[in-house]
Each structure stands twice: as C-alpha cells, then as structure tokens.
Image (spheres, rainbow, N blue to C red):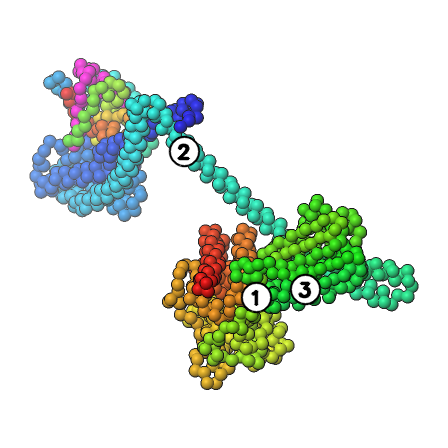
C-alpha cells in the first residue's frame, strides 16, 4: 500500500497528456475528457499483457474517424515513445476498436499504458486475436494521423 | 480385348474423379497450412519477446540519458520530462509482471531472478523520482547508480529472447519445409491426374476406357492369382499338416498296439501252450487248443498290420545283402512243406541254371513275399501242384532282372476278385474265408514289398484251373565279376586277414560300402546300425577293429567308443572314426578323443589303407589319418558329381556292389527326402534334422558334394523353421545328384560296351 501510494504520488499525471488528431491536413488536440465527450463505449476482453479479462471503456476509433469525416485510408497511430502502427480505416469501421481511456472504470496512468490505448475486442471477434493484430494495440497513444 | 461392361467403366471414371478431388483438396489444404505458417513467421515480430526486451533496453537507456544531466545538476534536453520517461520505463517493465511475458519469464529461473533484482532497484529509484524531478542532483545520481547496472540485466533478457526466438523460427521453418514437400507431392499427383484426365479427353473416351479397363483387369487378375495361390498354399499346408498328424497318430497307435497287445498275447499263447500239453481232459484240451490257435492267428495279424503300416509310412527300408536266390527258393519250399502236406500238394522248384549264384538284394523281404505266395498257393490248392520258379527275365541298368513265380493248379481267382486282391483286408469270396487263419494282409504286404524293391506282382489266373503269381526284381550279381578284378597294389598294404571288424553307421548304404571294402581287405565284417547296437555287439565279441561313424542319432561315435573301451570284450580294439566332416580341427578333436585313425567320407579303399596300415602293419609308414584333399581332377558336372571319385569307388567295391549301392541309395535318398518334407511340413525340428543328417550322409557317400552341403546346412540350421526355399533347393540338388549318378553309371556302361564292340 505504501509503495503504491508513493508510486502514485511520483508518477506523471495522465491527464497532462493530450491526443493530437490529424485529418485532412487539420490538427485537433484532445484531452482525455475532450475525447470522452465524443461518446464512450465499453467491452470486456483479455489482452496479451494483462492477466485475465479486463473491462475497457473509451471512444471507438470509428467515431473519431467519422468525427473527422474520414471513411477510408489508413490511420497512423503513434505513441509517446515513438512507436507507430498503421491501422486500416476499413478495419476500424468494421470492428468496434476502442481508443480506451479507462480500464475497469479507472483512468490509466502512463505506467498502465495510458492515457490512451488502442484496444481490439479480440474475445468477441476471434479473428482479431492474433499477433498480426497485437502490434496495433498501441498504448500511450499521443497522436492519430489519418492518411 | 473384351470390356467388363459399362458399370466398371463408370465406376473407374468416378474413382479417378474422386481421387482428383481428394488430391486437389489436399493440395489446397497444404497450401493454406503453408500460408498460415508463413503468416505466423511474418506477423509475429512486433509481439515477441525480443521486441519487448529491446524496448525495455531502449527506455532504460533513455531514462539514464535523462538522469545523467540531472545528476550533474543540469536540465536534461528533449521534450519528455523525466517523470514521463521514467513512467515509460516502468510501463515497459510492468509488461514482464503480467500477461504472456510474465509467463515466459517465470519459465527461466536465471532470468527471473535477474529481473526481480531489477524490479526492486526500479522501485527504489521510483521513490527517488520526486526529488530528482525537483532538481535534486544526488537523488538523480542515486537513481542512475541503481539503474545503470541493469543495462546488463535487460541485455541478458534480450539475448535470451533472441535465442528462444531463433529456436522457434527453426521449428517453424521445419514445419514450413515439410508442408512445402507435402504441397509439391500433392501438386505433382494432382498434375499427373490432371494430365491423365486431359489424355482421357484428348485421346477419346474409347482409348482411355481401354487403358483403364485393361489396367484394372491386369490388377484384378494379379490380385486374384495372388489370393488364389495364397489360398492354395494355405490349403496345402493344412492338408500336409493334417496328413502328417494323422499318419503320426496312426504310427503312435500301432506302436502302442504292438507293445500293449503283444505282451498279454504272448502270455496267453505261452500259457495255453503249457495247458494244452498238460490237460488230460480231451474236451478241455480242444478248447485250449482253439484258444492257442486263435491267439497265434491274432499275433500274426498284429505283426502283419505293423508291417503294412511301416511300409505305408515309408519307414521300412531295404537291407541288401549278398545271397543265393536258388538257395532261398529251396528254403522256402522246405519250410512250406508242412502246409503242402496238409492239403496233399506236391511242391517243386524250377531254377534257371544260368542264374548267377550270388546276388545282392534284401533276402529277408524276398523270402517274406515268397512265403506268402507259396502259403496262399498251398491254402487254395488241394491234391495239386505248387511250383516255385526262379528265372532270369532280362537285364536292366546293368543288373539282372530276376523273376520269381509261384504257380498252382488250385481253385483260381475270379477276375473281379483279382482287382481287389492287393487291397489291405480284402479277402476273396466267403469260400476262401473258410480256409484257416488269414489276415487278408499278406498279399497287400507282399505287393508293397515288391514295389519297394522296384517290381510288381502280376497275377494270372483262371477260376478252376489255377493261378500264377509272378514278380520281377532288379538284382545285382555279386561275387562272379569280383573274382576277375586285379587288386589295387596300394590296397595290398593293408591286410586284415583273420581280423574281426565291426563297422557302425546309421545309414545302410554307408554300411554296405564299408562292409564291402573291409571284406575285400580280408576281414570278417560285422555291422551295426547304431552306437547302442555296436556297444551291445562289442560286449559279446572281441573285435580287432571298430569303425565308427562319428555322427549318429542317439549314441554318437565317440560316445560308443568310450563305452566300448570302458567295458566288454572289445576294450583293446583299434578304433577308427568315420566322418563326413573334413575339417582339420575335427580330425584333431577325434584323435585326441582316443580314435586311432580317421577316415573321411566318402570312403575309398585307398584312404582306409593309408589310414589303417600303420595300425596293422609294422613296416608301413603311412600317416595316422587319411582324408582327401578335394579332388582337383573332378570331372564333369562339378555341381552334381565327382567322376574321379566314383571311378575310384567302382574299382574299390567292384561293379556289382556299385550297382547295388546306387539302387539302394536311390531308394534311401527318396525315403529321406520324404521324411525331410514331412518333418518340414509338420515343423518337427528333431525329425527334420535327423532326415537332413541322413540325406547328407547318403549324398556324401557318393561325393555328391553340393547337395550334401545343402543338406548339411539344413541339419545345422539352428532354431525356428528352416526356410522353405532352402529345403526346396536341397531336395532339388539331391534329386539332380541321384539322376546324375545314375546317368554316370549308365554312361560308363555304354562306353564299356562300345569298347567291347
């Protein structure tokens, strides 16, 4: 408990982090709250990095795309540490892929892969449960760039 | 070519289509599997342990890079604040604390321990983070000192991941290769079938139909033939087994009967004989006399049955000796005189004066046949004449064809009866049964005995006028031709005049050869057919020389010698070993065992002389043993015969004995082959070896080496069933050898005749 408390006190506040969305040459910056205001969804799923199923909540990537008038192409998802993955827009339109902001009802700190984490509903759609999709579960997302 | 009908064609076509479909499906399946493997290889990179480990390394390096200026009291460069960077590192490390990576880490104790120490230091550093962020250089320095050593820890983690990954890839690559092979195989098969289908379309339906049908027919025929021959072979095996089992059961039963019935019967006969003599009451004596006669009849019947069964089982072999046919015929007449007197018949003999005085044949068996025929003639003739005729019916194979005939002017035999006359247990009309005690087996036995000797009994009869029973058998003349031969000068070196010699061998032919040879050295020769018999004989008679076959069933040569030396009258005799095995070590072994000399088979007089001369002639310097080097000058068909040896043998034993020997060896070899075959079919290992041993001995006797070698190989076959091919080969070689032997003998004859003419 003490360690947890000290840790909690020491870590960077996830709320400080923002999400930059680039679409059609326009950049928009979202705080966690801004993003959640687009409307949140949730589902339970297992992941390769957690023990047991977790309940994730956040904004569907398809909603973000639609909010920016995007229906085709590719979205390049980048993380704070420079990691990048491309996701087909067709895929996020076909599956309810989340840009999660909460795990089990809690906001996620950077240490817990927050504040934004791409989460695939891999338990509901087994075709998504493979290594080919795993590399698109970008965590500590800092930007989305629709191309 | 005829077609089997449209049904077959349609079926064949569907079959090909089905095969094609299955192959195509398999190919597609293999292709998909291959793709899957490829995908797994291609897409697994971002989510593997190497990535996770290396990313941890990266974040640690970045964190250390931010701590270094702080520790020096400077503001770090870059956009990310220290705490965010540290959080990134923490999040990387936490990957190892849950999910699949945690599982992987737990499996490696060394890595797990290293990682735990890193996690502990990371927590310690975490506690220093607020101070370091606030600008405390010493806190930053302490953080750096805590974390810097763990570059090595994370490096280790990366390397281990790399190694595992390599192993995993290799495994995948192997699967990949297998799948590729499978794919190419299926692909090739599918391509072939496709080609076939195309050929079918291009060349027209009829052509393809013919091809398909003929291929199918050929296959079906092959399968059918295979099945049929397999079935037949199985049936043959079954039949052979059944037959041999039945024959064995019969033999066992008869052996039991011979003992279990004859023993009480002897008591009955003996006691009733005594009672008949002692009984004074005439009525009682008549009863006892009837019992006695009935018992004697029963005993005769049992003996006849045993004879017949032995004949039918091929167990009865001939025992040829030198004898006078004329004397035999006279003896038969004398013995049956009582029978003749009973029916008031006149008996006479008619003997062709040109008949050779001494001939070689089985005297006892000829006597048995004559006794039976003369007995019958006397039984069915009253107040008549019974004549025994001995005549020469010509020549065959250089031997005399001797005719024996028994004629009577009795009641005769009807044509209907004549056909059944030689069947066991067949007796003529009821009227014939009225005559006293006849088992009905006598003629059956006689017929088989004559057949065994190479002849047949011919009946000529007119009811009411009488019957003539005639049989011709081939006999070699003995003695007459021998007298003209000049002695081999080498043979004069061994003089056994006045010596008693016992020759022991389990094959009759070998015995006859040795007997003839030793007799020609001047010795008085006795023979024994087994070690046991020899020991028994040596107990009664003091022999000067005992010649022992080394390998005999039951008591072998060396054992018999030891037994004789231990006890009995022949303890001080000389012992010579006779063996078919001519290995130098064998010779040494036998001489060490106590034999005085060693003679290897096939035996020649020269060998006997050189082996034994020093034992009986003080002047002789001959070595103690004589075996032959293989005959370098072996002439003719090396596979079958040794012509040079056969020539020597002819000179050694004389033309007539040679002929008798060849006649006999033919019969014995045929009998051995039957036994061999039977034992092989029955799977009787002991009988099989015995037969093979006998066969090898017989063949070796005449230097039919190849066949003898094959037979010996069968004999020494250890454990399990002998290969049927090996048995077949040995039997074929034996038969070829015998044929060649006969041809050789005839060829020699022809040449001699040519020269004479």
Mark 1 residue element: strand
Q: Residue at x 55, y 54 (%)?
A: B674
Percent from the top left, x then y, of residue B625? 45, 76
**Residue underneath mark 1:** B477
Image-based side of B452 in relation to B596, left or right: right
* Distance from the alpha carbon under mark 3 to that under mark 2: 68 Å
Image-based side of B438 in relation to B77, left or right: right
The chain letter for the residue carrying disc 1 is B
Do residues under tags 3 and 2 come within 8 Å of each other at their CB atoms? no
Q: Few, some or many C-alpha atoms within 10 Å of disc 3 (few <14, some 14-19, many ≥20)? A: many
Q: What label does residue B218 carry, if any? A: 2
Mark 3 residue element: helix
**Residue B84 lies in what quarter of the image?**
top left
Q: Can you see residue B179?
A: no
Work out whether residue B285 or residue A48 is closer to the camera in this orientation and state it: B285
The chain letter for the residue carrying disc 2 is B
* Mark found first going from the N terminus, 3 or 2: 2
* Region in magenta: A53-81
* Mark found first going from the N terminus, 1 or 3: 3
Do residues under tags 1 and 3 come within 8 Å of each other at their CB atoms? no
């Amino acid at each position: 408990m003490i360690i947890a408390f000290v840790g909690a006190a020491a870590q960077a506040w996830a709320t400080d982090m923002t999400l930059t969305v680039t679409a059609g040459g326009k950049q928009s910056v979202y705080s966690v709250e801004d993003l959640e205001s687009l409307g949140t969804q949730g589902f339970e799923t297992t992941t390769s990095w957690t023990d047991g199923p977790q309940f994730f909540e956040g904004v569907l990537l398809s909603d973000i795309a639609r909010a920016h008038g995007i229906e085709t192409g590719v979205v390049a998802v980048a993380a704070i540490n420079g990691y990048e993955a491309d996701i087909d827009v067709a895929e996020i339109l076909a599956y309810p892929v989340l840009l999660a902001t909460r795990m089990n009802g809690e906001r996620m700190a950077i240490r817990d892969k927050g504040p934004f984490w791409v989460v695939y509903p891999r338990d509901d759609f087994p075709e998504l449960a493979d290594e080919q999709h795993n590399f698109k579960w970008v965590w500590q997302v800092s930007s989305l760039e629709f191309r | 070519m005829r077609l089997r009908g449209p049904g077959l064609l349609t079926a064949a076509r569907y079959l090909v289509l089905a095969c094609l479909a299955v192959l195509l499906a398999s190919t597609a399946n293999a292709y998909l599997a291959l793709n899957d493997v490829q995908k797994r290889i291609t897409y697994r990179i971002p989510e593997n342990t190497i990535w996770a480990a290396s990313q941890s390394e990266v974040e640690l390096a970045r964190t250390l890079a931010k701590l270094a200026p702080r520790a020096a009291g400077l503001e770090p460069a870059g956009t990310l604040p220290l705490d965010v960077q540290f959080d990134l590192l923490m999040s990387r490390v936490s990957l190892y604390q849950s999910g699949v990576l945690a599982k992987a880490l737990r499996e490696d104790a060394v890595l797990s321990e290293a990682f735990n120490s890193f996690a502990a230091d990371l927590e310690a550093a975490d506690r220093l983070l607020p101070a370091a962020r606030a600008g405390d250089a010493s806190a930053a320095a302490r953080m750096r000192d805590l974390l810097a050593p763990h570059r090595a820890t994370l490096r280790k983690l990366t390397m281990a991941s790399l190694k595992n990954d390599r192993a995993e890839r290799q495994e995948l690559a192997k699967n990949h290769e297998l799948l590729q092979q499978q794919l190419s195989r299926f692909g090739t098969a599918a391509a072939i079938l496709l080609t076939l289908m195309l050929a079918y379309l291009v060349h027209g339906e009829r052509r393809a139909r013919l091809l398909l049908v003929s291929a199918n027919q050929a296959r079906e025929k092959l399968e059918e033939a295979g099945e049929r021959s397999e079935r037949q072979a199985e049936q043959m095996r079954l039949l052979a087994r059944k037959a041999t089992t039945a024959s064995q059961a019969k033999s066992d039963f008869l052996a039991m009967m011979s003992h279990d019935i004859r023993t009480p019967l002897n008591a009955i006969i003996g006691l009733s004989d005594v009672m008949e003599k002692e009984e004074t009451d005439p009525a009682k004596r008549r009863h006892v006399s009837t019992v006695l006669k009935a018992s004697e009849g029963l005993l005769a019947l049992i003996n006849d049955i045993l004879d017949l069964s032995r004949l039918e089982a091929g167990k009865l072999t001939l025992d040829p000796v030198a004898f006078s046919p004329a004397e035999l015929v006279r003896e038969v007449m004398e013995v049956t005189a009582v029978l003749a007197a009973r029916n008031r018949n006149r008996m006479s003999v008619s003997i062709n004066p040109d008949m050779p005085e001494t001939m070689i044949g089985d005297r006892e068996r000829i006597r048995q046949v004559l006794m039976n025929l003369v007995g019958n003639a006397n039984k069915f003739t009253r107040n008549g004449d019974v004549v025994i005729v001995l005549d020469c019916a010509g020549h065959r194979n250089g031997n005399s064809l001797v005719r024996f005939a028994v004629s009577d002017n009795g009641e005769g035999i009807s044509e209907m009866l004549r056909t059944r006359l030689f069947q066991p247990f067949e007796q003529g009309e009821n009227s014939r049964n009225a005559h006293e005690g006849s088992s009905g087996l006598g003629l059956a036995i006689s017929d088989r005995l004559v057949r065994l000797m190479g002849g047949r009994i011919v009946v000529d009869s007119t009811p009411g006028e009488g019957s003539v029973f005639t049989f011709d058998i081939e006999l070699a003349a003995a003695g007459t031709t021998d007298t003209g031969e000049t002695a081999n000068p080498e043979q004069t070196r061994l003089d056994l005049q006045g010596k008693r010699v016992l020759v022991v061998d389990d094959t009759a032919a070998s015995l006859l050869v040795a007997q003839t040879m030793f007799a020609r050295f001047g010795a008085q020769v006795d023979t024994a057919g087994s070690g046991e018999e020899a020991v028994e004989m040596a107990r009664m008679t003091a022999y000067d020389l005992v010649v022992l076959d080394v390998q005999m069933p039951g008591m072998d040569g060396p054992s018999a010698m030891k037994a004789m030396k231990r006890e009995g009258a022949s303890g001080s005799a000389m012992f010579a070993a006779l063996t078919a095995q001519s290995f130098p070590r064998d010779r040494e072994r036998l001489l060490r065992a106590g034999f005085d000399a060693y003679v290897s088979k096939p035996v020649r007089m020269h060998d006997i002389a050189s082996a034994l001369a020093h034992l009986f002639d003080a002047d002789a310097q001959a070595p103690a043993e004589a075996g032959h080097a293989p005959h370098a000058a072996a002439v003719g068909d090396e596979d079958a015969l040794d012509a040079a040896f056969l020539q020597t043998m002819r000179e050694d034993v004389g033309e007539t004995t040679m002929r008798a020997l060849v006649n006999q060896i033919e019969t014995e070899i045929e009998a051995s082959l039957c036994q061999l075959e039977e034992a092989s079919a029955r799977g009787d290992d002991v009988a099989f070896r015995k037969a093979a041993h006998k066969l090898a001995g017989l063949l070796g006797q005449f230097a039919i080496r190849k066949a003898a070698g094959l037979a010996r190989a069968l004999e020494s076959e250890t454990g399990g069933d002998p290969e049927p091919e090996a048995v077949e080969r040995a039997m074929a070689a034996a038969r070829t050898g015998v044929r060649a032997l006969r041809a050789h003998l005839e060829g020699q004859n022809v040449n001699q005749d040519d020269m004479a003419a």
